[in-house]
Amino acid sequence: MSGFEQRAAQALHDVGLQQALRRTMDHFVNGRLRAIAALPHGEALRDHARVIRANTLARLDEHWLTFERNAQANGSRVHWARDAAEACDLVVAIARERGVRRIVKSKSMLSEEIALNKALEAGGLEVLETDLGEYIVQLSRDHPSHIVAPIVHKRLEDVAALFHEHLGTPPTADIPTLTAAARAALRRSFLQADMGITGANFAVAETGSIVLVTNEGNGRFVTTTPRIHVALVGIERVVPTLAEVGTLLQLLAASATGQPLSTYTTFITGPRRHPDEDGPEEVHIILVDNGRTQALAGDLAEILYCIRCGACLNVCPVYRNVGGHAYGAVYPGPIGIVVNPALDGLGPWHELPQASSLCGACTEACPVRIDIPRMLLRLRAASVEQGYAAGWLRWGLRLYAWAAVHPRLFRLGGWLAARAQRLLPGKRNGWNLWLPGPLAGWTATRGFPPLAGESFSARWQRRRGRRP
């Protein structure tokens, strides 16, 4: 059994996880359906958003040069990082040069991708996550399991027990009590922090601004209270104009949480300037590649259209049953099983493209209509070409392909298979077969119908009075 299969099997037998997933997944799905239906010309808006993303990536270099020029004119300092190590080194260097000791962070999947917290802690810096979900993840020494909702795998009672241990709240505390305790603990950290670190939902080339979308308000504390703000931005996140950002923001909120717009949508255009009284003294924007240029040059480039709403996770039958941790990656679900191989290469993630039923629900839900099944088929083919598929499967497919172009052999094989099935060890539900060997993985959870004793073509010819 492979690593993913082991983790998935554990998840399926985890009662607490199954309860948590059932409580939240339908809420996300139904909220998205209502929000998209409420948008004027919602489907046309999705088509327009896809065109925006495609056109932007086709001229990515031009847009980033425009962004860099305008951001620097606003007083921001722009840095370029080729990979995760370089991005982490830049953040640590900025902190050390400016005497930073305490750091507060707003939710950022890119910081998870580059393992920034480990690098900062190794550099002797104190780091605190301030998004409530990420704060809970940090307290429990866990990992996020969803792009938008990091603790979708935890139940209320799990969080209550964690806060009782770390913050002294009652072991049966309700949600208002838990959020009040977290707010009290986090407020002190906001006021004491020297640096705030965020991601960015979008970067606007036209104005040199970065855009943050949050629901808790912690993002605004992180970007205004500390004297230094560092924003990590994946190079695919640029958008040419403010008008195009407006289109994407409508779809992001509707697809992610079912809201018309997120509670806080913040545009940051450089550090504070006279006569501003609030805001950071310095704004550093780190543009991170980390495999994105490589992905853009290949046949998985479409995955970079993603605006990280998480809608594909919410509708995926695999994710809905096993949760995010089973994938063993920062990015789980349908988007993860493509973006991880696209950024890192297929080798570490060759199992993940199999974690799909190819039902197409992900593409149906995606606000920019990313064709994930097409890329999954390409990755599955690549895994066979590169020798990652099981030996019995590779040779079995080769044998089938050879027989399929020799009609007499193909007919003989069908005839033999129909008779050999009588030797199988049993039947299920009166007629579904139990298959042997590695094929037992199929019939362990679902039925396999018996093969017909006579092929369709033979039956057709017989009915027309011809000899089969």
Image: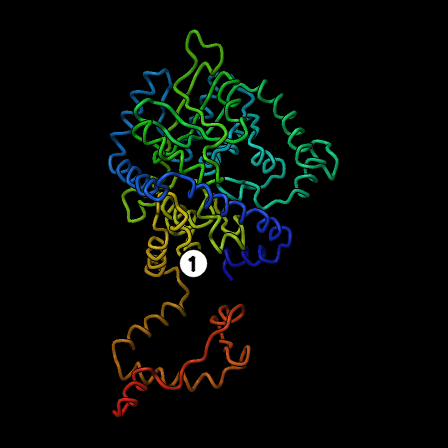
Question: Left or right of 23: which side holds 442?
Answer: left
- Please say whether residue 348 is visible from this viewpoint: no
Label 1 element class: helix
Seen in the picture, residue 143 relative to 194 is either above or below; the reply is below
Number of dots carrying numbers: 1
Foreground pick, 169 / 95: 169
Q: Position of residue 388 (x, y in %)?
A: 39, 59
Q: Position of residue 211 (x, y in %)?
A: 41, 27
The residue singled out by tag 1 in the image is: 354
Q: What's the residue at 68%, 35% (across, down)?
A: 163
Q: Position of residue 226 (x, y in %)?
A: 52, 18
Displayed quadrant of residue 456:
bottom left
Label 1 Cα crowd, 10 Å radius (few <14 / some 14-19 / many 20+): some
Quadrant containing the C terminus in the rendered view? bottom left
Question: Left or right of 32: which side holds 170?
Answer: right
Q: What's the residue at 48%, 32% (across, down)?
A: 262
- Please say whether residue 413 is visible from this viewpoint: yes
Question: Left or right of 456: which side holds 446?
Answer: right
